[in-house]
Amino acid sequence: MTALLELQGLSKLFATRRGFPRSATTVVRAVDGVSFAVEPGEAFGLVGESGCGKSTTARLAMRLIEPTAGSVRFAGEDVLAARGAALLRLRRRMQIVFQDPFSSLNPRRTVGRTLAEPLQVHGLARGRTARARAAALLDEVGLDPSALDRYPHAFSGGQRQRIGIARALVLEPELLVADEPVSALDVSVQAQILTLLKALQTRRGLGFLFVSHDLAVIRWFCARVAVMYLGRIVEQGPVGEVFERPRHHYTRMLCDASPVPDPELRGALPRVTGEIPSAAAPPPGCHFHPRCPAATAICQVEYPGWDGTVERGFACHNPLPAAVLPA
């Protein structure tokens, strides 16, 4: 079966100039050789600390920014080679829900205009037909159709995110890229939005690339997950296996730092050491070695190869034993 979305060796380098009066060019490896695939109807998670390259990867997958190297294929089609009408057809099949519901909507446009614009751009509907489709979508995401004539400032954060979801669905896509869609919302509203997205996935058969730093959200929503650290994937596999039997020490650190909502099971909170280094000056060898409790001499000079398969694997010189559960 052809994957819905497939990334191979995807990289993105940003060049910045720093210093005064004589500035120097610094290269930032935001994404460095990322590969994974999302199957039709599957929810695939991308997790890691802030600054690890998750959102950049999501934007590269959508071709909102151009990659430095690598390939992106959607249902077998080369996304990076598409031009003109071919690219427009691909964009109709994959849409994105942005993190910030406050800045992702145009404050000068009514909700009706916001939802009708994609239909007009793709030549699918205009006028009353577009308005009727927009009203039906608002009802599907839990908003009253009377919202069509109101502006974004009249809505709460959760309601704005529902509008953003409706905008992403208006073209009937096969894939939704959800870039931290609930991180800017209150906890109670997060649950409502996640329940809505899960219902939409079931009802429409949507595939999801779900970006988040919250392991609990990924565990609940996704079937498979890739763990990113400083632009690279360090572990990948089914959510249950990766979080319950992590092989990479960074994955275990993330799991240990994730709160357990059971006083009887929760022990002393583990001490998370260090911070994620700058992507402009990553440590030599394994990028995680300055924070890793199992680092050895080889970790400081050689980046580990991938151990395992694409379905379940990791990149670590001294992995955790497969049978050992996190403390």
Image: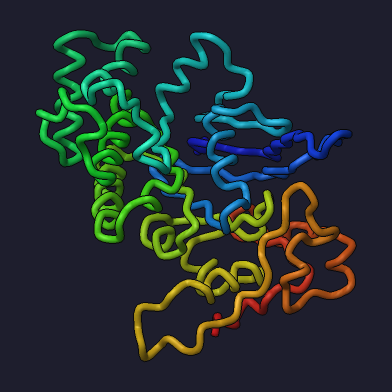
The answer to whether 123 appears left or right of 145 in the picture is: right
Judging depth in this view, the residue of 202 and 254 nearest the camera is 254
Write the residue at 66% across / 79% down: 321
Seen from this angle, which residue lies furthest front? 21
Q: Quadrant of residue 221?
A: bottom left
Can you see residue 190? yes
Question: Which residue is at a point 20% across and 15% down the rendered structure image?
Answer: 130
Q: Residue at x 72, y 61 (%)?
A: 315
Q: Quadrant of residue 154?
A: top left
Q: How is the image coloured?
A: rainbow
* Percent position of residue 249, x then y: 66, 72
Where is 209 relative to 66, above or below? below
Residue 7 placement (x, y as % from top left): 61, 38
Query: Does 63 sit left or right of 155 as displayed?
Result: right
Left or right placement of residue 273 versus residue 92 in this view:
right
Q: Nearer the viewer, residue 134 or 278?
A: 278
Determine the image quadrant of residue 132.
top left
Q: Is 324 above or below relative to 278? A: below
x, y percent for residue 230: 68, 53
- Horizontal and vertical percent for residue 233? 65, 53
Image: 199 above or below 249: above
